[in-house]
Image (cartoon, helix red, strand yellow):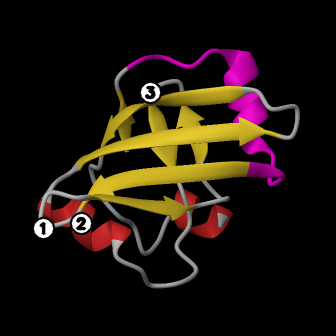
Amino acid sequence: MAINHELDKDDLRAFESDAKVGLLATVNPRGLPHITFIATIQAKTPRQLIWGQFTEGLSKQHLKTDPHAAFLIMSLNKELWRGKAQWTHERKEGEEYELF
């Protein structure tokens, strides 16, 4: 998922932690917000987020219809990162898939 601003090296390290809160906000077909808890969300690069899918929910369906999303990540120290993003693709193999 491509994000609208760059993250720095400290942000990248903070996002690696499994001990964080990750929220992904999408828009459902009726135009209403849909928020999902995704603890696996992390930064792959300064402009790209990735996450693993361990259960099947509605977020990915919503992103396939409308790729616009927003995210919030909160560390255990209550540091917050939030921004807008655009879903680009999913993978069933490769580096990201094996990471999760």
What is the spatial separation of the Cα atoms under label 2 and label 1, in whole angstroms? 7 Å
Position of 4 relative to 35 (above/below):
above
- Which residue in the structure is indicated by mark 2? 62
Check the image and name the residue furthest to the bottom.
56
Is residue 15 a member of the stretch shown in magenta? yes
Name the residue rendered at 69%, 24% in the picture: 11
In the picture, measured across the screen, residue 20 lies left or right of residue 1, that is: right
Q: Are marks 2 and 3 in contact (CB under 8 Å)?
A: no
Q: Are marks 1 and 3 in contact (CB under 8 Å)?
A: no
State the SS at label 3: loop
Position of 3 relative to 6 (above/below):
below
Q: Are marks 2 and 1 in contact (CB under 8 Å)?
A: yes
Type of amino acid at the residue the image marks with label 3:
Arg
Task: Tell me which numbered mark, 2 or 1, is placed earlier along the sequence.
Answer: 1
In the picture, measured across the screen, residue 90 lies left or right of residue 12, that is: left
Q: Nearer the viewer, mark 1 or mark 3?
A: 1
Type of amino acid at the residue the image marks with label 1:
Pro
State the SS at label 2: helix
Depth check: 44 or 75 in front?
75
In the picture, measured across the screen, residue 24 lies left or right of residue 75, that is: left
Q: Which residues are magenta?
A: 5-20
x and y percentages locating residue 31 in the rendered image: 14, 57
Type of amino acid at the residue the image marks with label 2:
His
What is the spatial separation of the Cα atoms under label 2 and label 3, in whole angstroms? 21 Å
Name the residue rendered at 88%, 32% in the picture: 77
Q: Nearer the viewer, mark 2 or mark 1?
A: 1
- Which residue in the structure is indicated by mark 1? 29
Label at residue 6 = none
What is the spatial separation of the Cα atoms under label 1 and label 3, in whole angstroms? 27 Å
